[in-house]
Image (cartoon, helix red, strand yellow):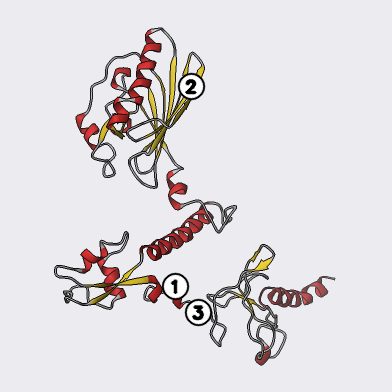
Amino acid sequence: MPGNESSRQPERTAFNLYLRTGRRPDLPPPVQVEVKFNPWHDEEDGRFTFAGQGRYFPRGDNTRPQAMGTAVGGQVRRPGRSNSDGVPDRRHLRADHPGNHSTHIVQPGDTLTRIAARRKGLTARDLAWLNQHPLDRPLSIGQRIKLPHQAYLDAGRAAKNKFLALAHYMDTHGGKSPPDPADPPSLESQILDNNWRKETKNGYDFHIDVIARPREVVAELTDGPIAARSRRAQAQAGQPDRRPGDDGGHFIAARFNGPGDSVNHFAQDRNFNLGAYRAMEDGWAKDLRAGKKVTVNIVPLYDGTSKRPYSLTVKWYVDGEPNIQHFDNEAKGKAHAGR
């Protein structure tokens, strides 16, 4: 009956509320509290978690909470010691914990900036905060300054980067977690390995990432005309990661009408440029003069956000016959080859 159906609607609403929150709205106000019991709580914020995650708090006030975690090899991994309230002791994670820093004795000429430069990623502001020393106040000779260990700084940076990488992955995948949430794809790879744009110059295709690095070059080579060189593009190639012994090398040489634009240049070890890479180009030129068709595919590999590739993989086809060379961007230039 429609009337009966309507009268049962409040009961269904109350039951749905109970399923979601454990609250009993049908009881008098003093009792309208969560009555569900979940012994599993997040270590950080105390919220309910799924079974097997967080910390296990058995029913009853007189029972000490049991630290539980992820099962590894059939055993449960337990977190560090807890205080009398069951809160994990995380003092060992603090920057001011004795195990996470050394003591620097201030010498003549020392400043927070100069001391911070001893550690990668550390700033004078960080040191001022850790030592509770005003940033604009000079140091005193003989003053003891807490200087974080590099390993501690690196671990903190890695943890932060993993968190950001996981958040970005979930944001771009409809809330889904990566296959291994504990080791998500790096934020750099997620951003830099996607959304490439293509530029075509002199008939050659350059695929470029969001920080303007060539990631793939696809070309059917031509035997000339010889393209004009750009001294500026050659001088700026790979900056700011260019090394003193680097040339501004071409992915596609000027003799093959390789463009003078910056996309066709990279910071290339001088010996590699004039040695193994040029020998490969000489082979291409010989095949072109013989009337053969030469197509190439060049993939430079980078470390993080560096503008200088640490290696190149070059595949090419001569009248359809495949060839491949793997180069290190170093003096020797060639790791190994295949044909």
Residue denoted by label 1: 93
Answer above or below: position of 133 versus 167.
Answer: below
Task: Using a 10 Å C-alpha cutoff, classify the residue at mark 2 as few (fewer than 14 neighbours), some (14 to 19) or many (20 or more).
Answer: some
Would you say the residues marked 1 and 3 are in contact, meaning their CB atoms lie under 8 Å apart?
A: no
Task: Using a 10 Å C-alpha cutoff, classify the residue at mark 3 as few (fewer than 14 neighbours), some (14 to 19) or many (20 or more).
Answer: few
Q: Which mark is residue 89?
A: 3
- Front-most of residues 198 and 125: 125
Task: Using a 10 Å C-alpha cutoff, classify the residue at mark 1 as few (fewer than 14 neighbours), some (14 to 19) or many (20 or more).
Answer: few
Helix, strand or loop at mark 2: strand
Q: What whole-number distance in Å separates the C-alpha atoms at marks 1 and 3?
A: 9 Å
Query: Left of 286 or right of it: where is 125?
Result: left
Residue denoted by label 2: 323
Q: What whole-number distance in Å separates the C-alpha atoms at marks 2 and 3?
A: 59 Å
Say whether disc 2 or disc 1 marks the residue closer to the N-terminus. Answer: 1
Q: Residue furthest right?
A: 1
Seen at 43% across and 16% down, the residue is 294
Q: Amino acid at mark 1?
A: Leu
| Res. 79 image quadrant | bottom right
Helix, strand or loop at mark 3: loop
Give percent across and percent down for residue 90.
48, 76
Q: Residue furthest left?
A: 108
Give percent across and percent down for residue 333.
36, 31
Say whether disc 2 or disc 3 marks the residue closer to the N-terminus. Answer: 3
